[in-house]
Image (spheres, rainbow, N blue to C red):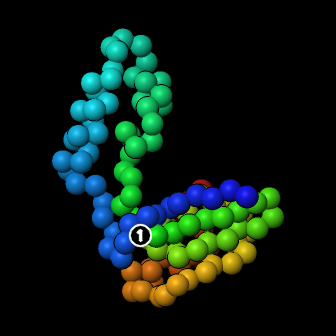
Amino acid sequence: MRIKFWGVRGSIPCPPSKEDIRAKILAALKLWPGGGDPEAFLDSLPPYATGPVGGNTICLEMSDDEDLLIFDAGTGLRDLGHSLVASTLTEIFEQFFATEKMPLIPVDRSPNGE
């Protein structure tokens, strides 16, 4: 069984601010040894140092080789949906239905993003 959190925020999505992004860039630059491949250096950093963390509202994916279950399909459902190309959704479990979730109902999308 695999578990992945696609969102952990409360009821209001909260993207990182300009200051948050600047702080991440500065922290990464302080670790930069100089020389070498900058792409390889970025790839070596932990995910929280190179991307947003915690901006989406609650969305939890549980899956195994046969089933995919989604709990509390908040705004994290959008990113989860983009990651699913060939998976079969088994069930979505909701505590409540809020207006923030209305535009997130999955729609058919081809693998090339059209």
Quadrant where the C terminus sits is: bottom right
Q: Residue furthest top?
A: 35
- State the image coordinates of residue 103 (x, y, percent, origin top left): 44, 80
Instruction: Examine the image and state in which quarter residue 28 appears.
Output: top left
Quadrant where the N terminus sits is: bottom right
Q: Is residue 41 left or right of residue 30?
A: right
Q: Nearer the viewer, residue 16 or 9?
A: 9
Q: Is residue 32 left or right of residue 47?
A: left
Other-residue count near label 1 (Cα within 10 Å), few / some / many at <14 / 14–19 / ≥20:
many
Q: Is residue 90 left or right of residue 100?
A: right
Q: Residue furthest right?
A: 66
Residue ID at (30%, 60%): 15
Is residue 86 at least partly visible in the picture? no
- State the image coordinates of residue 29 (x, y, percent, origin top left): 28, 26
Q: Residue furthest left?
A: 19
Is residue 14 at least partly visible in the picture? yes
- State the image coordinates of residue 26 (x, y, percent, origin top left): 24, 32
Secondary-structure class at tag 1: loop
State whether residue 5 is above or below residue 36.
Answer: below
Q: Is residue 14 left or right of residue 57?
A: left
Tally the numbered discs. Answer: 1
- State the image coordinates of residue 53 (x, y, percent, origin top left): 39, 53
Residue ID at (46%, 70%): 58
Question: Disc 1 marks which amino acid?
Answer: Thr
Residue ID at (43%, 24%): 41
State whether residue 72 is above or below residue 29.
Answer: below
Q: Nearer the viewer, residue 2 or 44?
A: 2
Q: Which residue is mark 1?
A: 57
